[in-house]
Image (tube, helix red, strand yellow):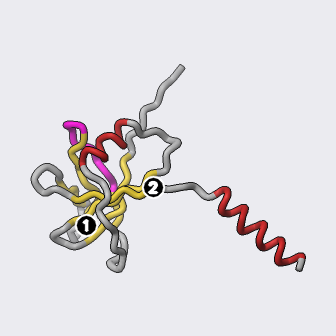
Amino acid sequence: MKKIYIIIIIAIGFQAFSQNHQNFVFEFDKKIDEIVFRKNTEKKEISGFKILTNKRKMFFSSNSIGNNSKLEINSSREQLNTILQNDNANHAYHFFVYLKDKNKYYSVDHIVRKISCE
């Protein structure tokens, strides 16, 4: 009985300290966005995407995710602009780009954080 209580307490502890991640899935637009390929490789591997946000292109590094993963597009370009404008290190956002022509999702992240010194 004592072991069951310890297991329950550990499970509750993991739930309490786990971070809440928000997933944002948006579709790649061939007309305004561009794909960046890795250099000096024999195969064409995608290293990231340049996504047009707030009237400038921002680089998102990428990793492809498994073919079995099916995500729903839940973010528009305007929502992405707002999220990136209000971004800070305390938020835990996960971004995904959907390439319609390849029917593939990519986990992406931007590396732009505003640093203020006092």
Classify residue 2 as left or right of residue 44: right
In this rendered view, identify the residue nearer to me: 117 or 40: 117
Task: Report the span colored magenta.
Answer: 54-61
Q: Position of residue 6 (x, y in %)?
A: 83, 71
Q: Quadrant of the N terminus?
A: bottom right
Mark 1 lies on residue: 45
Q: Position of residue 42 (x, y in %)?
A: 22, 71
Residue 39 falls in image quadrant: bottom left
Classify residue 34 as left or right of residue 108: left
From the image, state whether disc 1 or disc 2 is nearer to you: 2
In reply to whether residue 56 is colored magenta, the answer given is yes
Mark 2 lies on residue: 22
Q: Residue at x 57, y 55 (%)?
A: 19
Q: Amino acid at mark 1?
A: Glu
Q: Residue at x 36, y 43 (%)?
A: 83
What secondary structure is marked by label 2? Answer: strand
Classify residue 56 as left or right of residue 3: left
